[in-house]
C-alpha cells in the first residue's frame, strides 16, 4: 500500500466519521464543528486530487465564511440541544435510512460495475491541473459568462439577505 | 494517482447518503441546512475526482460555481432562518408549516 492510499484511507475514514457524528449530534453547535472537521478532510482530499486552488477555497469559503456564518446564527438564536433522543426509532427514520441505504447501494453498484477505466481527455497536464493559473485560464476563458453571471447571483444574494434579515418597523 | 477513481466515488456517495439521512431525519432547520452543505460537498468531491482522472479542468470550474451558489444559499437561507425565528420563536421544521396546506 502506497503513501497516497494510506493518506486517502485516513482522510476518507475521518470524513465519513465526522459526517455520521454530525447527523447524530443533538447540539447544533457541535454538529457545526463536526462539519468543519469534515470540510478540512475534504480540502485535504482535494489536495490529493491535485486541485490546489479549490483546496484553499474550500478552507476559506466553506470553513472560513459559510460555517462562521452558520455558527454566528446558531449563537445569535441561542439554540439549545434538540429535546428528542439521539436517534428516534420511528417509521420516518426507518424509511429514511432504508431509502438512503438504497441510494448508496445504487451508486456503489453503478460505480463498481461500470466505473472501471475512464478515458483521459485533452487538457492541461496533470501536474498543472488545479493551479491558480489553469483555473484562471478556464474561468476567464471558456467559463467567462458563467463567471460573470455568478457575480450577479452573489449581488442578488447580498440584497436578498439584507432585505430578509432586516427588522421591520 | 494510486487510489482508484471508484474509491473517491464511493466515499462521495456515502457522504451524500449521510447528508440525505440528515436532511430527512433532523428537525432543526440549521442542521438540515448544514446537511445540505454536506451533500453539496459530496458532489464537489465527485466533480474534482472526475476532473483529476479525466485531466479536464471543467469539473473544477464547476466546483467553483457550486461554491459561489453555496455561499449565496448560505446568506439567503440563514437570513430566512433569522426572519422565521423572529416571527415564530422556533427553528423546528415541524412547527414551520405555514406553507403547508
Image (cartoon, coloured by chain):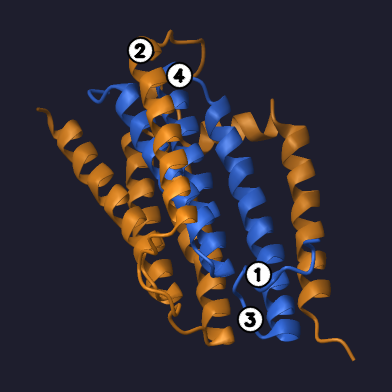
Chain colours: A orange, B blue
Residue reaching furthest right? A169
Which of pointers 4 and 3 lies earlier in the amino acid sequence? Answer: 4
- Give how far apart the Cα atoms at labels 1 and 2 are: 41 Å
Tell me: residue A22, above or below residue A6.
below
The answer to whether residue B85 is left or right of residue A28 is: right
**The image quarter in which residue A37 lies:** bottom left
- Give how far apart the Cα atoms at labels 1 and 3 are: 14 Å
- Give how far apart the Cα atoms at labels 1 and 4 are: 37 Å
- Residue assigned mark 1: B78
Residue A116 x, y percent position in the rendering: 34, 11
Q: Residue at x 69, y 25 (%)?
A: A142
Q: Residue at x 48, y 43 (%)?
A: A54
Closer to the eye: label 3 or 2: 3
The N terminus of chain A sits in image quarter:
top left
Closer to the eye: label 2 or 4: 2
Q: Residue at x 49, y 63 (%)?
A: B26
Front-most of A61 and B9?
B9
Residue reaching furthest front? A91
Q: Which mark is residue A110?
A: none
How many C-alpha atoms fall within 10 Å of the one at disc 2: few (<14), some, or many (≥20)?
few
Tell me: residue A15, above or below residue B9.
below
Secondary structure under the numbered disc 1 in the rendered image: helix
- Give how far apart the Cα atoms at labels 4 and 3 are: 48 Å
- The reply to whether residue A53 is visible in this rendering is no
Residue B54 x, y percent position in the rendering: 45, 17
Closer to the eye: label 1 or 3: 3
How many C-alpha atoms fall within 10 Å of the one at disc 3: few (<14), some, or many (≥20)?
some
- Residue assigned mark 3: B90
Which of pointers 1 and 4 lies earlier in the amino acid sequence? Answer: 4
Q: Which mark is residue A113?
A: 2
Dot 2 falls on which chain?
A
- Residue assigned mark 4: B55
Amino acid at each position: 500500500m502506497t503513501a497516497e492510499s494510506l493518506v486517502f484511507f485516513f482522510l476518507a475514514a475521518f470524513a465519513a466519521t465526522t459526517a455520521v457524528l454530525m447527523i447524530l449530534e443533538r447540539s447544533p453547535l457541535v454538529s457545526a464543528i463536526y462539519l468543519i472537521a469534515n470540510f478540512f478532510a475534504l480540502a485535504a482530499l482535494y489536495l490529493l486530487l491535485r486541485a490546489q486552488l479549490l483546496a484553499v477555497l474550500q478552507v476559506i469559503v466553506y470553513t472560513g465564511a459559510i460555517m462562521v456564518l452558520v455558527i454566528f446564527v446558531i449563537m445569535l438564536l441561542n439554540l439549545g440541544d434538540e429535546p428528542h433522543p439521539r436517534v428516534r426509532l420511528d417509521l420516518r427514520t426507518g424509511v429514511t435510512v432504508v431509502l438512503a441505504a438504497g441510494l448508496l447501494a445504487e451508486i456503489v453498484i453503478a460505480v463498481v460495475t461500470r466505473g472501471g477505466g475512464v478515458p483521459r481527455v485533452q487538457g492541461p497536464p496533470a501536474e498543472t491541473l488545479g493551479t491558480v493559473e489553469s483555473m484562471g485560464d478556464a474561468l476567464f476563458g471558456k467559463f467567462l459568462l458563467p463567471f460573470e453571471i455568478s457575480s450577479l447571483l452573489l449581488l442578488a444574494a447580498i440584497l436578498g439577505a439584507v432585505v430578509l434579515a432586516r427588522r421591520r418597523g | 494517482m494510486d487510489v482508484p477513481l471508484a474509491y473517491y466515488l464511493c466515499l462521495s456517495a456515502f457522504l451524500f447518503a449521510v447528508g440525505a439521512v440528515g436532511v430527512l431525519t433532523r428537525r432543526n432547520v440549521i442542521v438540515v441546512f448544514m446537511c445540505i452543505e454536506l451533500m453539496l460537498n459530496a458532489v464537489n468531491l465527485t466533480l474534482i475526482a472526475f476532473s483529476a482522472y479525466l485531466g479536464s479542468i471543467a469539473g473544477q470550474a464547476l466546483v467553483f460555481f457550486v461554491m459561489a451558489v453555496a455561499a449565496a444559499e448560505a446568506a439567503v437561507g440563514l437570513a430566512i432562518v433569522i426572519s422565521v425565528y423572529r416571527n415564530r420563536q422556533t427553528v423546528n421544521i415541524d412547527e414551520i408549516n405555514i406553507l403547508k396546506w
